[in-house]
Image (cartoon, rainbow, N blue to C red):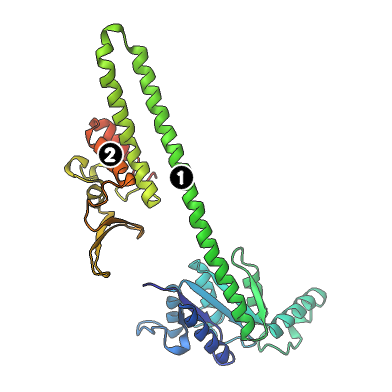
Amino acid sequence: MAIPRVFISSTCYDLKHIRENLKYFVKTIGYEPVLSDDGDVYYSVDAHTHDACLTEVATCQLFILIIGGRYGGEHKGKEGSITNNEYREAVKNKIPVFALVESAVYSDHYTYLSNKKTNPDFYEKITYPSIDNIKIFGFIDEVRKNSLNNAIVSFNDFSDMETYLKKQWAGMMYDLLAERTRNGNAKITNRLIDDLTIAAKKSEELIKVLLRTTNTEQLEVEDKISKIELIAKARSFPNLVETLYNSRYLSVLDLGEFPDPKEHKYWYDFLVATNDFVIHVDDDSGYETYYLYDKANTYIELGPELDSKKDDPMFREIQSAFEALKQVDPETRKSILEEMIIPF
């Protein structure tokens, strides 16, 4: 099972006890802590150790930034300290950052800002007892002035940090679950809109048929209606794929790259033939279960056999749409498949 990796960034020696407590805390949550002083960073023989830390940051999913009273070593070849650039790498990769600053440093930062405003000629010459380098205050400002994810919280001891992180990560989990609900509702709404659009097109075609029909053409009406219904059913295929996988678009660039739907029995066989999907067999539980994955690693269960869910309402609907797609005329089929090509 994949678990989140949490990069813990700070100067090492003055905050060693804090880093050790954080490492233990992250492990108890069930996540993987990553600390440079614990050998968790791979130091490539082809890169400087400072750059190796940045590479490791990009592999993590969460980032804890601790700002203490020591500025730390300058990053070789870059502006700012190693910690500064680890933070910037997290921001660049859009990794959620949880920034904490020692309360004494935060208090002196307030004094620094006041002096900067009232004593612009002397504020940099004033001694601030909690820090060894005034650049620390500039780094705090950098974090606070970021347009996103710019929260910064002071702490007195580790218990403050633990309480804060527990609340923040619980809030993040709630937000993720709420987002799933919102996405589910949005998918239902989009599906209804798509169905209404298809129904409107179907009604429009039916009206045209009826208006063109004379008494001598009554025998052809049912056939024409059947064709319209078949086209409407076929047009629902991209919408159903989007319902299952949050996207209807495939990585094909033109129609010539599409497999021929008529050469495939089931809808999932056709999707696999596009090379954007793969069927995976899981037998970890002692019996085989088939799953259909897309390139984003979204998956649905196909069952213990590939056609075992053929009577499931959703599977029956998408298979019915796929059968209709195979039966419509080539021009209609072409226009439907074009809806699955990413628009540029």
**Residue sitting at 17 percent across and 43 percent down?**
263
x, y percentage for residue 261? Answer: 22, 41
Residue 155: quadrant of the picture: bottom right
Q: Which mark is residue 320?
A: 2
Mark 2 and mark 1 residues within 8 Å of each other at the beta carbon: no
Disc 2 or 1, which lies upstream in sequence? 1
Question: In the picture provided, is 344 more to the left or to the right than 252?
Answer: right
Single out the residue that lies furthest toward the right. 118
Question: In the picture provided, is 146 more to the left or to the right than 244?
Answer: right
Helix, strand or loop at disc 1? helix
**Residue sitting at 59 percent across and 64 percent down?**
148
x, y percentage for residue 165? Answer: 58, 76
Q: Which mark is residue 125?
A: none
Vertical placement of residue 271 versus 290, above or below: above
Query: Which quadrant of the figure contains the N terminus?
Result: bottom left
x, y percentage for residue 234? Answer: 30, 35
Residue 18: quadrant of the picture: bottom right
Query: Which residue is under mark 1?
Result: 188
**Residue sitting at 30 percent across and 31 percent down?**
231
Question: In the picture provided, is 25 more to the left or to the right than 282?
Answer: right
Q: Amino acid at mark 1?
A: Ile
Q: Amino acid at mark 2?
A: Ser
Single out the residue that lies furthest toward the left. 263
Residue 77 visible in rendering: no
x, y percentage for residue 189? Answer: 48, 43
Disc 2 crowd, CA 10 A, few/some/many (<14, 14-19, 20+) = some
Residue 280 visible in rendering: yes
Query: Which quadrant of the figure contains the C terminus?
Result: top left
Vertical placement of residue 57 versus 254, above or below: below
In depth, the one of 185 and 341 nearer the eye is 185
**Residue sitting at 56 percent across and 92 percent down?**
13
